[in-house]
Amino acid sequence: MASFQTVKGFRDFYPEDCALRNHIFDVWRSVARRYGFIEYEAPVVESTDLYKKKSGDEITGQLFCFKDKKGRDISLRPEVTPSLARMATARQRHYGKPMKWFQIGSCFRYEEPQKGRTREFNQFNADIIGDASPAADAELVALAIDVMLALGMKKDDFVIRLSDRRLWSHFLEEQKIDADKTAAFLQVIDKMEKVPESVTAEKLEGIGLTLAQVRAFIDGASEAHAVFAPLRENLSARGLWEYVKIDPGIVRGLAYYTGAVFEVFDLKHGLRAVAGGGRYDNLCGLLGGTEMPCTGFAMGDVVLGEMLKQTPGAQFAITDGLLKAFALDVYVVVADETARSHALAAVHELRRAGIRADYAFGAQKVGKQFQAAEERKARFAVIFGAEFPTVKVKNLTARSESPVSSAHLVTTLQQMLQAPDVGPLIA
Amino acid sequence: MASFQTVKGFRDFYPEDCALRNHIFDVWRSVARRYGFIEYEAPVVESTDLYKKKSGDEITGQLFCFKDKKGRDISLRPEVTPSLARMATARQRHYGKPMKWFQIGSCFRYEEPQKGRTREFNQFNADIIGDASPAADAELVALAIDVMLALGMKKDDFVIRLSDRRLWSHFLEEQKIDADKTAAFLQVIDKMEKVPESVTAEKLEGIGLTLAQVRAFIDGASEAHAVFAPLRENLSARGLWEYVKIDPGIVRGLAYYTGAVFEVFDLKHGLRAVAGGGRYDNLCGLLGGTEMPCTGFAMGDVVLGEMLKQTPGAQFAITDGLLKAFALDVYVVVADETARSHALAAVHELRRAGIRADYAFGAQKVGKQFQAAEERKARFAVIFGAEFPTVKVKNLTARSESPVSSAHLVTTLQQMLQAPDVGPLIA
């Protein structure tokens, strides 16, 4: 029989990949918590209507949508923001404002798989609900920067490209372009970097504009513009304004943004945006709830993973994450099968004490057991042999060895594992 | 416009629910790591064929299956074991045996939602691949017990119901029942506790057996049976045999089990099985890969969550998990708006130092800011006022207050947060 394949665009996370993923999740979670964000999780499946019209044409064209057995139109979520808006409006009286919420989980888009793009990806979403001030937008930009730095990136690895959709609303007003053309216009700007100039020029003409007008506006944008003043002041106080570059070419593809928008952009490897987001003050109302000002961003694991692998400063963090996933504290070697039940009891006690311990299930040569200990990066081996109740504890880094009474094994190892030469106990 | 609803059988994890879920995930992950298991993750979507025939009729009748835009038959995974077998056989030469792997993630079944049963649930899967010995089965039973204990359960809260499908193979042989009726027979035994006696009797007659014969066999089962000897010896060495009850009525619904099978069973609240698993030595071969002996179990979060909420011993652990999700270390109070940029810089420094810090985005009365600090269970408040660069640090538990130079704020708070009266710093 032919063996089975992974479905196109989906990923198997073998242990090495899972360790990198968990390292990214751990950084997302710990930095978000330091910022006072609280974790929630929305369902992976929502009714398809939730995305139609609200998210914009691009994303609804990429929906993994299907009918359930009762004929309901449901979709694997392509993004989390509409679910968050649904959840927040449903219980908006229950939580004090502003709500600073984050979630980590899978999203799905039916796109052609390519580098940095899969049909399933993990996304970190951070949002602030119920606060209309630029201080909330600044808090999110700061969070995005600190996540990148915590992952081992440096200032020259990435930049925040910041814009505001209201710049373009004013521009279109000045150019006397109908407001109902705004959505189409923003789609053109969003695609500008990715399509040939002639395509952009033609589309702009259809709206009643020239490429030269648009280029002049983009080039003329300055961080001195009043719309950016509160963010500049706020981020400067944190020493973070130097990470920001004003770029009106950033408008974000989703339909629901209303104000400040930004992207986290890789500077060295020509990758797609690592993260993006902005203010969306109308979405809760559009979904039938109470109007609430909202702002947020999402960061995916696919482009970020590529970037981490290619950034020297992030290598140490990756190694650390891998070690955390694999390394044992102790490998228990059974040198004499008559001691097996004692060894098993000791393994159990060690684990109960929070120590990562493993052993061979059946009789094996001592050399092979030591080999397994090394493969699993164990820091200590404990040898159970004919001398039981005395056992030997071997420091596999220092290659030193000492006899210990098995009655004191757990406490002895707890002390040894906290000694500086073996590093801290892995939680 | 009508507001949107969650799709039937799917769950919104608001922060309180998410904290409980994360507490369960943390325990699953940390106990599995102590046991030397390594984390992987399989895709949420697989080709439908992977489940057909392999998992058995019951589960394939509950598949969330659909066609993608290219007409491929794909399914949201109802369980993880077939994916694991697929992944393990695809790279079986790459990893030393035994492979001790675990994963945590969502599964989906189209069942009628009811207490302890949703259409989406989280599952912890732990499996040992490439080891045919009962020591591997015992390792999994021990892991399941230690997970329950780590969650705050006591001996009288749960029991491991242990059986072995080979008992029934022998029974059917003795009764001269055709081997091709085994699958149908095991389905009858699996449903026995849930359907009226008359239904079971009728189905057994169809196979050529009487209910009395089956009952006599179940009642006659003893832990002294030779098939259980290695597990009894192994688990006794760890002091865990007292958690086990032999029960041949446990056969598990999935088609692929071949040997030892077990369930973790709630003893007090009449809930469904909390976990279940067993040995499945043929699955890798059935999926077209190399034959490899395998054994594993899965534990879901829905029944477990119900059990935790109803078990007094687990309450402390839940509270702890909630606190970990919500509590701030420090709330920075801006008592004078002229100090805001200094306060913002301090918040930033505190967060960089790994401290959970928050503040109000805009000007607010001091009393309201202290109220927010209390709502978020902050342990300290730092007040930035006209006295800057001197700030006030207030211990919100001890209600004590002291002036600190803002230049020493981070180091001072780091020391204060490690003092025993405020508990350890939340990671």
Image: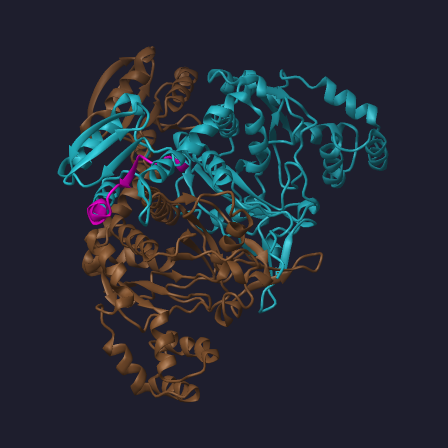
Chain colours: A brown, B cyan
User: In this picture, is B291 found above or below A377?
Assistant: below
User: Along the horizontal axis of the image, is A31 left or right of A107?
Assistant: left
Residue at figure coordinates x 31%, y 42% from the top left: B358
Residue B49 percent location from the top left of the image: 62, 56
> Magenta segment: does it hold B202?
no
Residue B56 percent location from the top left of the image: 67, 45
Q: Nearer the viewer, residue A292 or B244?
A: A292
User: Along the horizontal axis of the image, is B250 left or right of A19?
Assistant: right
Residue at figure coordinates x 42%, y 54% from the top left: A123
Q: In which quarter of the image is residue A302?
A: bottom left
User: In this picture, is A56 found above or below A334?
Assistant: below
Q: In which quarter of the image is the N terminus of chain B?
A: bottom right
User: In this picture, is B297 found above or below A128?
Assistant: above
Q: Which of A201 and B302 is in front in this view?
A: A201
> Magenta segment: does it hold B338?
yes
Q: What stretch is highlighted in magenta?
A: B326-343
User: In this picture, is A168 found above or below A161?
Assistant: below
Q: Nearer the viewer, residue A411 or A291?
A: A291
Residue at figure coordinates x 27%, y 17% from the top left: A412
Q: Nearer the viewer, residue A352 or B333?
A: B333
Q: Quadrant of the C terminus of chain B?
A: top left
User: Along the horizontal axis of the image, is B2 left or right of B134?
Assistant: right
Residue B268 percent location from the top left of the image: 63, 22
Residue at figure coordinates x 33%, y 86% from the top left: A211
